[in-house]
Amino acid sequence: MADGDQSAKRVKPGMEDQGNIHAEATTPSYILTRDATDRNTFNEAVWGRVFNHRRDTNRIPIAVAQASCVAHVREAVELANSKQCRVSVRSGGHSWAAWSVRQDAILVDLAELQHMAYDKKTKIVSCSPSATGEQLNDFLKVEGRMFAGGHCPDVGLGGFLLQGGRFPAIVTSFHLLTRPFLQMYNCVYVYPQSMFRTVFQWVIDICPTADPETEIVCLAKRTSDGNDIEIVAGFLSFKPSKEEAEKAMRRVHDSRPAGAKVEIFCEPTDFACQYAGQREEQPTGHRFCSENAYIDNDADDVPGVLEKAFTSLPTQKSFALYFSMNPTSRRPLPDMAHSMQSDHYFALYTIWDDATDDAQCTGWVHDIMKDVQRHSAGSYMGDADFQHRTTRFWSRENGERLRDVRRKWDPEGRICGYLDADDSSGVQGLKNEFEWVDKTDE
Ligand SMILES: Cc1cc2nc3c(=O)[nH]c(=O)nc-3n(C[C@H](O)[C@H](O)[C@H](O)COP(=O)(O)OP(=O)(O)OC[C@H]3O[C@@H](n4cnc5c(N)ncnc54)[C@H](O)[C@@H]3O)c2cc1C
């Protein structure tokens, strides 16, 4: 991605006027048009809520609709129909590649569309897509309920639940079944980089029979002086009491490899504390490149596949993450689009603050993924950028079905599809194929 000139428009010869909405007396005040809005105001409306500061500012919408009610959303789509242009959507602004910012589209920003209500009888919470995980869980806490959104407090529910381009319409309200709020207890073990293989294999081995109400991760991050990398094994248990957490985590604790620099056993924690930690790990105002893969269950040596990623982090703030998914990954899935999973989820979060480091940092990510992808079953959309790498995001059957849904409900491609290279996938959707597999090999 490049920081380009915001005024440089990519308009095809002969179609110079098609990409403009001329401000008319009837243009509602919540719609800011590119040609009639002060440049700084328009730029702020386009980019102000985008989390990632590594941005392709060559992409310029023709208008931003700052919708605060459902009627505004409808009007913006009707305007797009009459102008024959596309509509893009923004809820929380956290998609890594800024999927909401599209060339010559009307961007519907849902920040001001806000509502939240809980039904005690059904235990369903209704909320607007721009609500964040933190806002939702704050709201639900007094009801003794919770909803599992993004780990980062500010991720919008809209993108978290739908991801970019998957849903060929605009959702204005979600109705979500909540679950009981339990206490949270943390076990953390920090090891030197030299113990990477031992610690990683321990995490993989213990996961299938570990407590199912515990989230298990292994991550690599730099020490505070930046000289070394440390390997952190983390176990976050959701339990009604400390006693139950200690009972559930005892086997993990007793089997931990010797040699930890730090050991924490069943320390009470809560959402506020967990969200604060995430905020620190993924700070605002930075440049990011995120990538991920579900490593194939048949991969011979998972620590070996991921060793380079975990032991060569390019900047102080970057980290590599492994989520142990087994046995969750082994349960049959209900009838839903999200159908890609394996026992091993791996993601890279590369973080820096100076544009001059873009090539080095993105180059490191692409270099790691070039090898890792050959051991993968596919990827998770939320941490992907299909402008640079395409892969499988669904089972073959579900991927086809999703393409059919898009073609049926939005045959003209009014709603922006996936932001692939050149933003050209449109109504066809993504191919759901490994880009590195020779077709004759399959
Ligand atoms: C710091 C950070 C931490 C993250 N942590 C996690 C995590 O812990 N777990 C995880 O799963 N993911 C995580 N993500 C990834 C995140 O889930 C995705 O990037 C998600 O798309 C962001 O949602 P959003 O609404 O904030 O983004 P937006 O950029 O606002 O939306 C992304 C896209 O989703 C679609 N969309 C959004 N709202 C609607 C709607 N109302 N109707 C139709 N389509 C819509 C649109 O295509 C839109 O362009 C993280 C991202 C960041 C930047």
Image: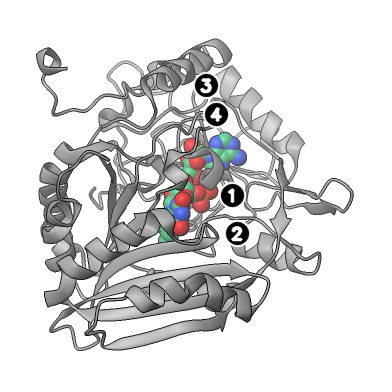
Q: Earlier in the sequence, mark 2 or mark 4?
A: 2
Q: Amino acid at mark 4?
A: Met
Badge 4 crowding class, 10 Å Cα cut-off, few under 14, some 14 to 19, many 20 or more, is few
Q: Residue at x 42, y 56 (%)?
A: 209
On residue 133, the disc is 2
Q: CA distance from mark 1 to mark 4?
A: 17 Å
The residue that mark 1 highlights is 157
Q: Which amino acid lies under the numbered mark 3 shown in the image of this protein?
A: Arg
Nearest to viewer (mark 4 / mark 3) = 4
Percent of width and height locating residue 45: 51, 52
Q: Nearer the viewer, mark 1 or mark 4?
A: 4
Characterize the local packing of mark 3: few (<14), some (14-19) or many (20 or more) Cα atoms within 10 angstroms: many
Give, as a three-letter code, the residue at label 2.
Gly
Give whichever of 90, 271 is nearer the camera.
271
Type of the residue with mark 1: Leu
Colour pattern of the rendering: one colour
Which residue bears the numbered disc 3?
414
Q: Which residue is mark 4?
A: 336
Q: Is residue 87 left or right of residue 241?
A: left
Which element type, helix, strand or loop, lies under badge 1? Answer: helix
In this view, the residue in front, 246 or 75, is 246
- Locate the C terminus by quadrant: top left
N-terminal of the two: label 1 or label 4?
Answer: 1
Q: Position of residue 229 (x, y in %)?
A: 18, 77
Q: Splitting the image into 4 quarters, where does residue 158 fall?
A: top right
Please tell me which residue is depicted at 15% across the width and 37% down the height of the picture.
Answer: 374
Mark sitting earlier along the chain (1/3): 1
Does label 3 or label 2 sit earlier along the sequence? 2
